[in-house]
Image (cartoon, rainbow, N blue to C red):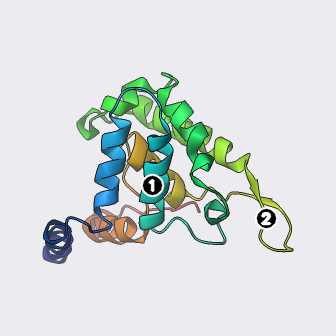
Amino acid sequence: MEKITTVIEQYLAEASADTLHRYHSWDHCRKVFALSGPTIHHQLHLGFYLASWGMYRGSGGLLQKNHMVHEGVVDIYYSGKFEHLKHYRPTDLSDVIIDEILGLKREVSNYYRGIRFKRGNKEEKAISTTDTLMSKVLLGTFGCTPAFDEYFIKGFTEITKDKKIKFDRGD
């Protein structure tokens, strides 16, 4: 547990030492999504946050698109369908909330999979909707789930190793 505390302290120290650090892109994204009404700023902040958190790689498809690729996610956010997840607290976790978060993930994933991209002379394909990408989108917009990236998985595995809990990424 001491190792995890050290890593968290290092993360916080890096971010607080540099107000322009990439880690702050999440803060900016969440702030703009807390504003009322959809604007182009939501798409721009979501795109920049995802890029600075490693989600704009060539193989996934987002790199081949501009910020407008996130318009549908902004529409889902403001549709009202998942309004209660904007105010969700981890202490309220229940099977119902988990099902709703998974439903939101499916809707966002279906939106992105409906967008096709092509690189060079390669075959056209859908944007790849890995659990890592989907969790980072949900973190940046609704804030209702952690980012299921390699760092979270390593930390989760470390703190639960004595509890015999296994984490399945599902990617």
Where residue 60 sits, quadrant-wise, is bottom right
Q: Who's the residue at 70% across and 49% down the image?
A: 113
Question: Is 49 on the left-hand or right-hand side of 129?
Answer: left
Numbered disc 1: secondary structure: helix
Which badge, 2 or 1, comes first in the chain's sequence?
Answer: 2
Numbered disc 2: secondary structure: loop
Q: Nearer the viewer, residue 157 or 61?
A: 61
Report x, y in % for residue 97. 41, 32
Q: Residues within 10 Å of mark 2 (few under 14, many from 20)?
A: some
Q: Who's the residue at 56% across and 52% down the image?
A: 67
Q: Residues within 10 Å of mark 1 (few under 14, many from 20)?
A: many
Nearer to us: label 2 or label 1: 2
Report x, y in % for residue 11. 21, 71
Question: Is 151 on the left-hand or right-hand side of 3?
Answer: right
Q: Nearer the viewer, residue 163 or 154?
A: 154
- Amino acid tagged 1: Lys
Residue 118, disc: 2
Q: Is residue 79 visible?
A: yes
Where residue 61 sits, quadrant-wise, is bottom right
* Image quarter of the N terminus: bottom left
Q: Which residue is mark 1?
A: 136
Q: Who's the residue at 28% across and 51% down the image?
A: 27
Q: Nearer the viewer, residue 7 or 126?
A: 126
Q: Is residue 53 visible?
A: no
Tag count in the figure? 2
The answer to whether mark 2 and mark 1 are in CB contact below 8 A is no
